[in-house]
Image: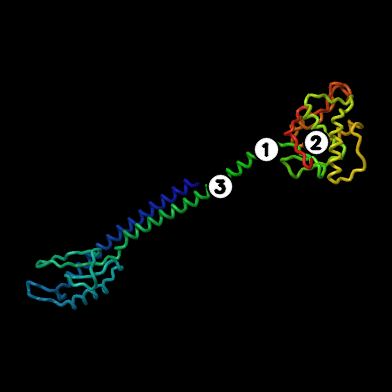
Amino acid sequence: MKKYISIFCSVFSILLAVFFMENTVQTQHQEKLAQLQILNRIALDLPHINLANAFLSHSGSEDDIKQYINQLNQQLKLSNLVEVVAIDGISIKAVDERMATNTLVTPSREITVVFSQAHQYSTAFFIVVVLMGALASAFIIALIRMRDIKINSLSALNKDNQEQAENIVSIVKIDLNNKTLGLNTNHELAVALANKPLCFYLALIEFCVEHPTITLNQNKDVPDELIELANKYFYRLTQLGHTIRKRPNFTNSLEKTLSEIRAALDELLIDHPELKDIYYPPKAHGEGSRSRLHSYGLSNISVSDIEVIGK
């Protein structure tokens, strides 16, 4: 877009220059014609103009010549292109170098006639107009440039924000203050979880971070260390002011507890199924639900994968 605007401004300035140059040439030509017509008129009026004549020892009359010049200018009115300022050195106003001078040649003498040209300002006016056109073009281009810089800056900022958003890794955050699961990339998403599965899940995460290779089989008792961690988080809930009647037994109904955890994670990770390998307690596969090879432990989780609020 900026390229086309620059081309338009350049072409406009060139056309403007051509127009005023042509106008100047045409006006100057018309002025020359007007001067020739006036010279012819003066030649016809010479017998009646009281000019000084050294050959005849005639001093002439300055007042009569000025009166003639004024009458001549009133009578001709040649579109105000030129006017007679002086004849044979007698002038009706100050003569300067910008005025045109012509010579009327007679058999006995030469008479100078000075003309004031209406087009004296044309060259300066032409330069001013071209400069104004150039300044206007530069101003328009500067505005477009500023707009492009602003658009590019906003685009770069949006791109940086987008790249930053893309570079943010989604991790699960658990808020003990309101007993919910959430994601650090979605502050509006919050999935509530009951006391027992919430405390057990927190304990399971901490236990598996410390013991990444241990096998947790539902056919075996829950490790005492895992139970202690679950009780620790339950006690923390009571400290935060949550109304709790009694401490749950974390060794009972393990499958139900894990199912509640999985249901909450299904809702939380519906748009991020790739995170289930990290946070999802694996289900049993193979013959029956108590396969000896099955472990509900989180073997892929690390301390950087979880954020606990109110711990």
**Residue hosting label 1:** 168
Q: Earlier in the sequence, mark 3 or mark 1?
A: 3
Task: Give the alpha-carbon distance from disc 3 to disc 1, as whole Å.
Answer: 25 Å
Is label 2 in contact with label 1 (beta carbons under 8 Å)? no
Is label 3 in contact with label 1 (beta carbons under 8 Å)? no
Left or right side of 144 for 294: right
Query: Quick check: 212 above or below 4?
Result: above
**Residue hosting label 3:** 151
- The amino acid marked with disc number 2 is Leu
Q: Residue 90, how many percent across, how many down? A: 18, 72
Q: Residue at x 40, y 57 (%)?
A: 132
Q: Residue 158, how many percent across, how many down? A: 61, 44
Q: How crowded is mark 1: few (under 14 residues within 10 Å), some or many (20 or more)?
A: few
Q: Residues within 10 Å of mark 3 (few under 14, many from 20)?
A: few
Q: Residues within 10 Å of mark 2 (few under 14, many from 20)?
A: many
Q: In which quarter of the image is residue 65?
A: bottom left
**Mark 3: which secondary structure?**
helix
Task: Give the alpha-carbon distance from disc 2 to disc 1, as whole Å.
Answer: 20 Å
Q: Residue 139, how many percent across, how many down? A: 46, 54
